[in-house]
Image: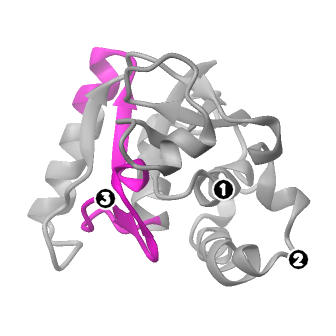
Amino acid sequence: MESAVFGGGCFWCVEAVFAQLKGVAGITSGYAGGTKPNPTYQEVCGGASGYAEVIKMEFDPSIIPFRVLLEVYFSAHDPTTLNQQGNDRGEQYRSVIFYQNETQKQNAEAFIDELTREKVFDRPIVTAVEPLTNFYPAEQHHQNYYAENQDQPYCQVVISPKVAKIRKKYQSYLK
């Protein structure tokens, strides 16, 4: 098993997208990129903590390669908006890949270069590729949020379309 840490807006959205994939054994919503130990949701949402809302997923690369995780990640959010996803604004919602080894760093940077060369997006990709220096799990009520709250308006309006898009595009990788 390996792990990957991605931030692409609200962690509820990112978690819901990756939770449906074969080979993803577990996901923890949390915070990475800041410096204060044990940040709270309120501190991170305040926007001045330096932390991003992220997910840390455990995955089996023999079932779902890191490359496919990158493809899903860049399909599920807008990597061209700085510190924003939809109506969520602030550095806590930034597009960021926190790599855990040199291979992940090289693969993420090469994939971004490929997307840029192929002009997949109309605007420049602003996704940061940074070393993972810390990760703190979010509070328990943020874990598995979409699965437990699908009737909530935010889930229906914001998360469900992202989940549906990935279900359609990556059928061969669905659980």
Question: Which residue is pictured at 85% across the width and 71% down the height?
Answer: 150
Q: Quadrant of residue 24?
A: top right
Q: CA distance from mark 1 to mark 2?
A: 14 Å
164 on left or right of 95: right
In the structure shown, which secondary structural element does the residue marked by tag 1 occupy?
A: helix
What amino acid type should be assigned to the residue bearing mark 1? Trp
Q: Residues within 10 Å of mark 3 (few under 14, many from 20)?
A: many
The x, y position of residue 52, in whole percent, is 43, 42
Q: Are marks 1 and 2 in contact (CB under 8 Å)?
A: no
The x, y position of residue 167, in whole percent, is 67, 70
In the structure shown, which secondary structural element does the residue marked by tag 3 occupy?
A: loop
60 on left or right of 130: right
Q: As drawn, which residue projects farthest toward the left?
A: 117
Which sits earlier in the primary sequence, circle 1 or circle 2? 1
Residue 8 appears in the rendering: yes
Label 3 sits on residue: 83
Label 1 sits on residue: 12
Question: Which residue is pictured at 26% across the width and 51% down the height?
Answer: 127
In the structure shown, which secondary structural element does the residue marked by tag 2 occupy?
A: loop
Q: Are marks 3 and 1 in contact (CB under 8 Å)?
A: no
84 on left or right of 77: left
Q: Quadrant of residue 99?
A: top left
The x, y position of residue 71, in whole percent, is 42, 55
Label 2 sits on residue: 151
Q: Residues within 10 Å of mark 2 (few under 14, many from 20)?
A: few
Residue 79: within the magenta? Answer: yes
Question: Which residue is pictured at 52% across the width and 39% down the height?
Answer: 43
Q: Residues within 10 Å of mark 1 (few under 14, many from 20)?
A: many
Which sits earlier in the primary sequence, circle 3 or circle 2? 3
Nearest the camera: 24 or 8? 8
Q: Which residues are magenta?
A: 77-106
